[in-house]
Image: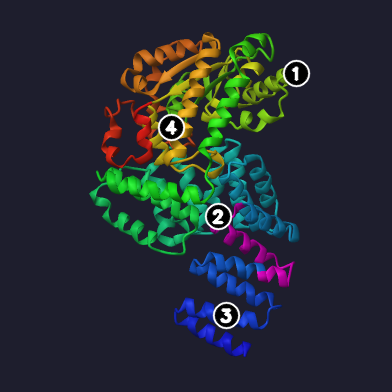
Amino acid sequence: MTNTLLMRARSCLDAGRLDKAIELLRAAAASVPADAALWHDFGYLCLKAGRFGEAVDGFRAAVLADPRFTLAHVRLGVALQAVGDTGAALEAYRHAAALDGSRADAPFRAGALLEALGRQALALAAYRQAASTRPPSALSGLAEARLALDAGRHDQAEQLLRALLATYPGHLEATDTLGSVLADAGNAEAASACYEHVTQASPQYAGSFYDLVRCRRIGAADATLIGRMTATAARRDLHAEARLKLHLALGKAADDLGNPAEAMRQFDLAAAMRRRGNEADGQAIVARVEHLIDRFDAQRLVQAAGTGHPDRTAILIAGLPRSGTTLVEQILSCHPDVHAGGELPFWTERAALVDERDPVSLARTGIEYADLLHGLVPDGAAATARVTDKMPLNLFQLGLVHLCLPRVVVVLCRRRPIDVALSIHRTYFHRGAGLPTGGAPLVAAVQAMERLALHWRQVLPAAQLHEVVFERLVSDPGEQVAALLSACGLAWAEACLHPERNARVVRTPSRWQVRQPITPPSPDAWRRYEPWLGALGALLHP
């Protein structure tokens, strides 16, 4: 009976009747429940068909029948990731890596997932494991390129990827990664070509439509591209994260084409997917802010004068995401005495380990941070060179930073709350960002973080905090840039008025915007969305 079912399944598969083949293979596997290979093949067909929950069941049955079936563990991780169960997916990848240390796929997949979750230190450990596997493979080479990117060796990463593609022509993951590397460097045309290739080659890369449409403004000539995105969105075999990014891509295209109603519909669909995937809780952010305001009051910060480490290398740029932090870093890093550090995870990773009541712990943390920044300064730079750290959510850490480094200048970025919220709503954030992206939770988070920003303005020393209001910066860059440089203790540099000429690598969602000349935004740009703001409308009436 089993052989008959298998023969019929093969016949249906050859005829393109994938769903019928799956049902026959399920029956065949059920007739021999201890046959791990049959359950694996059933899971694999379900994976190809986008029936991800059933794929999970098939692969779980396979590893139950044969706990040492490494490939089944890897593909179980892929299926679990597709349904959004990231914790179980990581466990499956780790189990596979422990079973067979010569495979690059398990640690590489774990690294990519950890990176998407914002757990960078663990991601790098996984990439190092993948890169060390022998014999070398496409995925071990990709892991090596990811490690080069994290170390800031952008040119080396590009060289590694191009060499990899010479060895494995058309490798989709390498092509997609090369697209991101080129996009970070500002090469929009070459990046677009990479994204075009992968999105046409496989629905697995539907999420890359998001990166593609952000390379340029979408116009009437892009009807074919929009048609491809729409057709891809109708498929049922898309992973959850790819579908989420595709909704954002369709929203951006609709916005460019002057259709705000359709744009907001797509953005709302993406936010709804986030909520189903256990998005960050706005009320948790409210509680965190209230705790920080109580913990770091003015008296506490005054009493702590003289603690920490006196180094002033850092220029800390903080604020709500999408408030102009990347633009400020782009401006400052045009200065000959400033090096861009990007979004450093130091404070988010270290905060819980610092004993705020212990002067030794505070000073040691300040020294460790200063040493990190000194290591980012290029060889030959002046001893007084400064380094920016533009992790926006260091907003939560400014009290602790001041205790550890009381001479550090903080640049606090602010932007009209409704524009911040709309920009967050339209932008992809990895799940580790800890930020709601729509509705009442986003409103609560924005209002709470605005309250925290006001608190820091009131309690931190005026000489150590400079506020940059986005609307003023883009409307009058001459005066605002001069004030910014002065607050940071930097001499005037004409180059800072032209951040679009800054050729540095930018690895944030604003990588395209900051390569344009500073221009004033349309006044009240949010108004075109007013009928569809929903809960976000509460930010119009603080």
Q: Which mark is residue 358?
A: 1
Disc 4 is placed on an element classified as loop
Say whether marks 3 and 2 touch (CB < 8 Å). no
Residue at label 3? 25
Question: Which is in the foreground here, disc 3 or disc 1?
Answer: 1
Q: Is residue 78 magenta?
A: yes
- Per the image, the residue denoted by label 4 is 322
Between 532 and 386, which is closer to the camera in this rendering?
532
Q: Residues within 10 Å of mark 2 (few under 14, many from 20)?
A: some
Mark sitting earlier along the chain (1/2)? 2
Residue at position x 64%, y 77% from top?
A: 38
- The quadrant of the picture occupied by the C terminus is top left
Q: Earlier in the sequence, mark 4 or mark 2?
A: 2
- Residue 302 among magenta residues: no
- In the image: residue 286, left or right of residue 114: left
Q: Residue 425 at x, y = what percent?
A: 41, 40
In terms of sequence position, does the residue under pointer 3 or pointer 1 come before the other? 3
Residue closer to the observer: 125 or 453: 453
Looking at the rendering, the stretch of residues picked out in magenta corresponds to 61-86
| Residues at marks 3 and 2, CA–CA distance in whole angstroms | 25 Å
Tag of residue 84: 2
